[in-house]
Image (cartoon, rainbow, N blue to C red):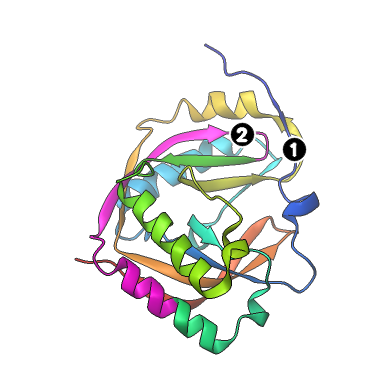
């Protein structure tokens, strides 16, 4: 069955574009492709499937991520060292008893503005949901409820951003040819990062703020 055709639109437009000069604190999971070799191979295969579509900008390996929660409404520069230290301490305490866990990444899904790898583990009682909920509580306790206005679930890892117009049905049809369509993603730590949005390259980059280990 052919994938339904939907017009693709550029991702970084309108209210998705941050104010000039802003960076934002985010809590991410990083895929550690050196340890998750099957996922690394699958990402390469997905990129190969997307290569014919010039309206997509694949996310380079160093900048692949799973968004747990962004800090909304306040630029990172206005979050003081004391607030960062308090947030790190609360995250460390909140996640100390969460065991390292493994998610399943895939299938790849082409939407109207991104291509993402779907993730499991985001239902109540499952590990990604637990990390997400506890992270939101920690951020809210330090920076207020408006800082968690954005809802990052369902779980996903973006593998490409749209930079122009096209047909998502053709992209999805190409991605469906990739086999295997799933791979394991083992998570051992959570990262607090200062994230920069590059609208020209359609990519998010970051500098580390804190690394929060899970229980092993």
Examine the rendered structure and indicate whether residue 48 appears above or below residue 212: above
For this orientation, the residue located farthest to the top is: 1
Q: Where residue 103 sits in the image (x, y, percent)?
A: 32, 46
Viewer-side residue, 26 vs 148: 148
The answer to which of marks 1 and 2 sits earlier in the sequence is: 1
Viewer-side residue, 102 vs 152: 152
Examine the rendered structure and indicate whether residue 164 appears above or below residue 94: above
* CA–CA distance in space, label 1 to label 2: 9 Å
For this orientation, the residue located farthest to the bottom is: 82
Residue drawn at x 62%, y 18% as measured from the top left: 4
Find residue 172 and name its label: none
Say if residue 65 shows up in the picture.
no
Residue drawn at x 39%, y 80% as measured from the top left: 89
Say if residue 50 shows up in the picture.
yes
For this orientation, the residue located farthest to the left is: 216
Crowd around label 2: few <14 · some 14–19 · many ≥20 (10 Å): some
> Which range of residues does the magenta coloring cover?
88-113
Q: Mark 1 sits on what residue?
A: 9
Examine the rendered structure and indicate whether residue 141 appears above or below residue 175: below
Q: Mark 2 sits on what residue?
A: 111
The quadrant of the picture occupied by the C terminus is bottom left
Q: Where residue 167 sits in the image (x, y, percent)?
A: 69, 27
Viewer-side residue, 50 vs 120: 120
Give yes or no for residue 102 being in the magenta stretch: yes
Circle 2 — which element? loop
Residue drawn at x 32%, y 74% as measured from the top left: 93
Q: Where residue 13 sits in the image (x, y, percent)?
A: 78, 50
Q: Is residue 70 left or right of residue 14?
A: left
Circle 1 — which element? loop
């Amino acid at each position: 069955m052919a994938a339904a055709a939907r017009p693709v639109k550029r991702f970084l437009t309108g209210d998705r574009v941050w104010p000039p000069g802003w960076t934002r604190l985010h809590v991410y999971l990083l895929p550690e492709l050196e340890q998750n070799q099957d996922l690394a191979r699958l990402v390469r295969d997905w990129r190969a499937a997307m290569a014919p579509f010039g309206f997509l900008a694949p996310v380079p390996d160093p900048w692949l991520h799973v968004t747990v929660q962004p800090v909304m409404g306040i630029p990172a520069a206005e979050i003081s060292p004391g607030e960062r230290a308090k947030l790190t301490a609360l995250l460390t305490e909140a996640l100390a008893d969460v065991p390292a866990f493994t998610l399943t990444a895939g299938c790849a899904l082409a939407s109207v503005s991104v291509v993402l790898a779907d993730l499991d583990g985001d239902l109540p009682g499952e590990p990604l949901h637990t990390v997400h909920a506890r992270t939101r509580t920690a951020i809210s306790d330090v920076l207020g409820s408006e800082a968690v206005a954005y809802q990052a679930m369902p779980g996903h890892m973006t593998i490409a951003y749209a930079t122009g117009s096209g047909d998502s049905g053709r992209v999805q049809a190409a991605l469906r040819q990739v086999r295997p369509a799933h791979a394991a993603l083992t998570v051992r730590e959570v990262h607090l990062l200062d994230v920069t949005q590059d609208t020209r390259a359609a990519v998010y980059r970051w500098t580390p703020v804190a690394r929060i280990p899970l229980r092993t």
